[in-house]
Image (spheres, rainbow, N blue to C red):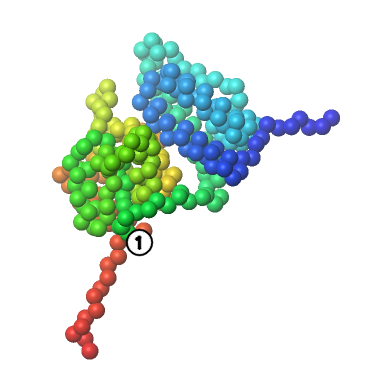
C-alpha cells in the first residue's frame, strides 16, 4: 500500500517571500499580545490566523508548522479569568506560551535566513547622506537630543510624523520612509504605565522594531531609558541604557556602531609642513 502523501509544502520564490513576510508579521504582533488579556479574544484571533496561515504556506505536517504548533490539535489550558487566586499563574503561563510561539516563528525565519533575499527597490534620494530611521514612542527630550546628535554627525534623522505623508495611509507612510533609510534606531522610553506602576515602551515601537530587524538584520541600534520594562520578545537584543540627564552612553553606542558600519570615517589631513 503506497505511503500516504504528507501535507508538506515547499514555498519558493515570491511564494517564499510571502510566507516569510507572514511569519515576520505574526511574530511582530506577539509584543502587542503581551499587553492584552491572557488567552483572550485578541490572542484567539491571532492564533486562528497564524494557524491557518502556516498550514497554507508550509502544510500541517511540515517542520515549520510543528515548530509553532508541536502537537496538532492540542489545546492550551488555562484558569478562568474570574478565578483571582490563580491570576498570577495564569499570566505567567500566558507569557511563557507567547515566548514559545516566538521561538517557533523565529526558527522558521532562521531556516531561510541563508537564502538570497531580493533587495528592496531603491528609492531616489536627493542627497547622499546617511539616513537613520528613529522608532520612538512619545515626543520626549531624548528623541530631540538624538536627532540633534545625529545631525551633528552628518546623519539625517528620519522621524515619520515630521515628514510629509502625501495622502498615504499611516503604515504605508512609515514603510516608505523606512525603506529610504540606511539603518535604524529603536528608542525605548517610558510611554505606558502598567497596573503595578511599571513603565513599558510604546506598542508601536515593538511593531516597528520587527520591521527594522527584517530590513536591517545587522544595522539596528537599541537604546533603552532606565526604568523601562521590555516585553519578553523585545528583551533579547543588546541595548544601551540611558537617561534624559545622561545621554552620553547612548551617543557613544551610536558612534561605535556607525564607525563599524562605515558611515563615520576619520581622515587625517596631510601635513603640508613635512617636506
Q: Could you tell me if residue 114 is visible in this image? A: no
Q: Which type of secondary structure does the marked residue at label 1 adopt?
A: loop
Residue 220: percent from left, percent from top: 36, 48
Q: Quadrant of the C terminus?
A: bottom left
Question: Which residue is rendered at x = 29% and y = 46% of the image?
Answer: 158
- Please identify the quarter of the rendering in which residue 13 is found: top right
Q: x, y percentage for residue 32? A: 38, 29
- Relative to the observer, which residue lies in front, 21 or 244? 21
Q: State the residue lying farthest toward the top.
A: 82
Q: From the image, which quarter does the N terminus lie in?
A: top right
Residue that sits furthest to the bottom in the current view:
275
Which residue in the structure is indicated by mark 1?
262
Residue 228 in the image: above or below residue 131 = above
Residue 191 seen in this snapshot: yes
Image spot of residue 152 (x, y percent): 20, 56
Q: Nearer the viewer, residue 2 or 82?
A: 2
Left or right of 4 in this view: 173: left
Vertical arrangement, residue 126 with respect to residue 186, above or below: below
Residue 113 drawn at (x, y percent):
52, 47
At a point 30% along the width and 44% down the height, the residue shown is 134
230, 96: nearer the viewer:
230
Left or right, residue 107 beside residue 4: left
The count of marks equals 1
The residue sitting at the front extreme is: 167
Amino acid at each position: 500500500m503506497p505511503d500516504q502523501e504528507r501535507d508538506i509544502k515547499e514555498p519558493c520564490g515570491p511564494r517564499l517571500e510571502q510566507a516569510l513576510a507572514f511569519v515576520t508579521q505574526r511574530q511582530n504582533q506577539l509584543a502587542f499580545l503581551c499587553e492584552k488579556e491572557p488567552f483572550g479574544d485578541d490572542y484567539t484571533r491571532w492564533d486562528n490566523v497564524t494557524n491557518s496561515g502556516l498550514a497554507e504556506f508550509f502544510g500541517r505536517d511540515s517542520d515549520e508548522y510543528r515548530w509553532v504548533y508541536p502537537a496538532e490539535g492540542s489545546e492550551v489550558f488555562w484558569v478562568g479569568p474570574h478565578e483571582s487566586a490563580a491570576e498570577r499563574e495564569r499570566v505567567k503561563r500566558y507569557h511563557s506560551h507567547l515566548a514559545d510561539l516566538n521561538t517557533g516563528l523565529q526558527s522558521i525565519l532562521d531556516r531561510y535566513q541563508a537564502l538570497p533575499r531580493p533587495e528592496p527597490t531603491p528609492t531616489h534620494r536627493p542627497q547622499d547622506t546617511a539616513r537613520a530611521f528613529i522608532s520612538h514612542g512619545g515626543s520626549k527630550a531624548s528623541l530631540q537630543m538624538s536627532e540633534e546628535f545625529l545631525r551633528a554627525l552628518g546623519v539625517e534623522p528620519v522621524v515619520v510624523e515630521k515628514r510629509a505623508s502625501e495622502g498615504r495611509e499611516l503604515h504605508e507612510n512609515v514603510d516608505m520612509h523606512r525603506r529610504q533609510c540606511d539603518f535604524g534606531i529603536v528608542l525605548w522610553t517610558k510611554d505606558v504605565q502598567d497596573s503595578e506602576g511599571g513603565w513599558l515602551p510604546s506598542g508601536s515601537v515593538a511593531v516597528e522594531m520587527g520591521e527594522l530587524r527584517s530590513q536591517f538584520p545587522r544595522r539596528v541600534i537599541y537604546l533603552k531609558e532606565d526604568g523601562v520594562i521590555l516585553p519578553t520578545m523585545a528583551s533579547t537584543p543588546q541595548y544601551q541604557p540611558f537617561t534624559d540627564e545622561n545621554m552620553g552612553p547612548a551617543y557613544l553606542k551610536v558612534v561605535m556602531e556607525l564607525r563599524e558600519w562605515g558611515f563615520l570615517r576619520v581622515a587625517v589631513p596631510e601635513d603640508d609642513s613635512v617636506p
